[in-house]
Amino acid sequence: MLELNENQYKIQGIALTELADKYELPLYVYDAEIMKRQYNNLTSAFSEIPMKVKYACKALNNLSVLKLFRSWGSGLDTVSIQEVELGLMAGFAAKDIIFTPNCVSFDEIAQAVKKGVVINIDNLSILEQFGNTFGGNHACCVRINPHILAGGNYHLQTGHIDSKFGISVYQLRHLLRIVKTYSMKVTGLHMHSGSDILDAGVFLQGAEILFDTAKSFPDLEFIDFGSGFKVSYKDDDVVTDIEDLGRKLTENFREFCTEYGRNLEIWFEPGKYLVSESGFFLVKTNVIKQTVSTVFAGVDSGQNHLIRPMFYDSYHRILNISNPTGSTRVYSVVGYICETDTFAWDRRLPEVHENDILCFMNAGAYGFTMSSNYNSRFRPAEVLVVGGKDYLIRKRETMDDILRNQIPIDEKTFL
Ligand SMILES: *Cc1c(COP(=O)(O)O)cnc(C)c1O
C-alpha cells in the first residue's frame, strides 16, 4: 500500500524517491502486496463455489509478475500465441491457460491446440474449421456475446451489437448445428463484456443469459465470466463491489448447477482488477512552461510509455512525490512526444518545480504493455517490490533495442 510518512510516499517501507534515484526515470514500479490483496479479495468473495482465476496477462505481462500469480494458484488468460508461450515459460501448466483470441488465423489456434491450452472460440467460421480439423478429439470453449451493455467508456465495451467479439447469442441455433454436425465437445462457455462494468446487476444479467445458453451444452465443465471488474481511477469512481457480486453470483450459480444437474467451475479473467492499482509510474518534470492559457508541467515521458490518457481519455491520479504536502496549484501535465501528448488538464498538484518527480497512479494495467518506441524513445525499466525488497524485473532499453532488427543497406545502392 502507498503510505505517506515523514513527507515520503512509500510502498512496503521503501520510498518511491529512493527507487527513482536507484533505477532512474521514467520507471514503472509494482507493489506485489496490492496484487495479492486484489487476488485474495476475489478468491474470498467466491470461496463457497469452485472458482478459478485466470489472470489476463495482456494487462501486465512481465514474467516475474506471471510467476507471482502462478505462485498464488492463478491460471492465465491469453490473447495471442506469444502470450501462451510467455505463460508456459512462467511455468503455468497448459491446462491452466485459456487462449481467447479474436480474429487470429486458424493456424495460430492450431498451434495453441498443440501446446495443450484451453481454446476459446469466438466466431462460427473458426468453430467450423475447428470441428472440421479436430472433431470431437479436442474440447473447446465458446465465447458468447450476450449483448448486455457494460457501463462507462464506449471504447472499453465489447458487448454491444457492433462488437467484433464473441458469437452472438442470437446465432445459437447455427452454433449448435456446427457442434452437432462435427460431434464437437464444448466444455466451456465464456463471456467478456468489456472493461467497465459498473454494478453487479449488469454482470448478473449476462450471467442469466449464459446459464440459459448452457442448457444446450451437455458437456460443460466450466463457465467463464471474463472480466469487467472496475477499480477506482478517480476519487469519486464507482467500483465493483466484489463481495456483493460474490454473494449474488454464488447463489445464482448454485441454483444453475442444480438445474444443470452437475457442479461446474466458475472462471474469471481479471486484468485491471488484479494489477491496475499495484502500479506507479514515475517521471521527472523537465520544464515548467507558463503559456497564456495554462501552466504546463512537461515530463520526461509521454504517450509512448502510458498511452491510456490519449487513447481512451482515461483519468490517472497524479502525485508530486518530491513535494507531497506543498500548497497546490493548477497544472496541465504533458509529455515530451511530438504530438498533442496530454496526460492531464487542470490538475491541482502540490507546487511542481523542474526536476520534481511525478507519480501516475493505477499504472499497473495497460501501462508498460501498451508502451512503444515512438519518437525513438526507450521503453522504461520495471521494478517489482515484493517481501519488502525491490527487484529490477526489466531493464531500461538502450540504443541497441532501437536498432535491433534493422538491416541497413549499403548507401551505394542509392546512387
Ligand atoms: C482484456 C481481457 C480481459 C481482462 O480485462 P480487464 O478489463 O483488464 O479485467 C479478460 N478477458 C479477455 C478475453 C480479455 O480480452
Image (tube, grey):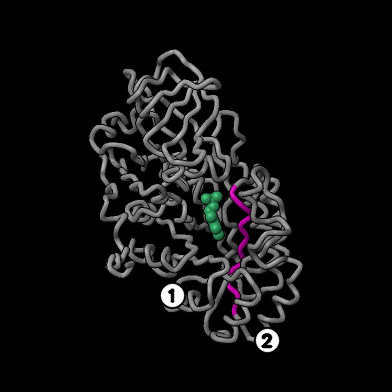
Which element is circle 1 on?
loop
Question: Which mark, residue 95?
Answer: none
Residue 404 is one of the magenta-drawn residues: no
Q: Is residue 268 visible?
A: no
- Eyeballing the image, is 268 above or below 384? below
Quadrant of the rendering where the N terminus is positioned:
top left
Which quadrant holds residue 174? bottom right
- Residue 44: % across, % down: 50, 46
> Looking at the picture, which amino acid does disc 1 mark?
Gly
Along the viewing direction, whichever of 3 and 399 lies nearer the viewer: 399
Q: Are marks 2 and 1 in contact (CB under 8 Å)?
A: no
Between 253 and 327, the one nearer to me in the picture: 327
**Residue at the location (31% across, 40% down)?**
385
- Graded by Cα atoms within 10 Å as few (under 14), some (14 to 19) or many (20 or more), the crowding at tag 1 reads some
Q: What is the CA distance from the residue labelled 2 to the residue labelled 1?
A: 24 Å
Q: Is residue 192 magenta?
A: yes
Which region is colored magenta?
Answer: 185-195
Q: Is residue 100 in sight in this rendering?
A: yes
Residue under label 1, please give it.
116
Q: Is 249 positioned to the left or the right of 91 in the image?
A: right
The residue to which callout 2 is attached is 181
Query: Residue 78: where, in percent of width, then height?
Result: 47, 62
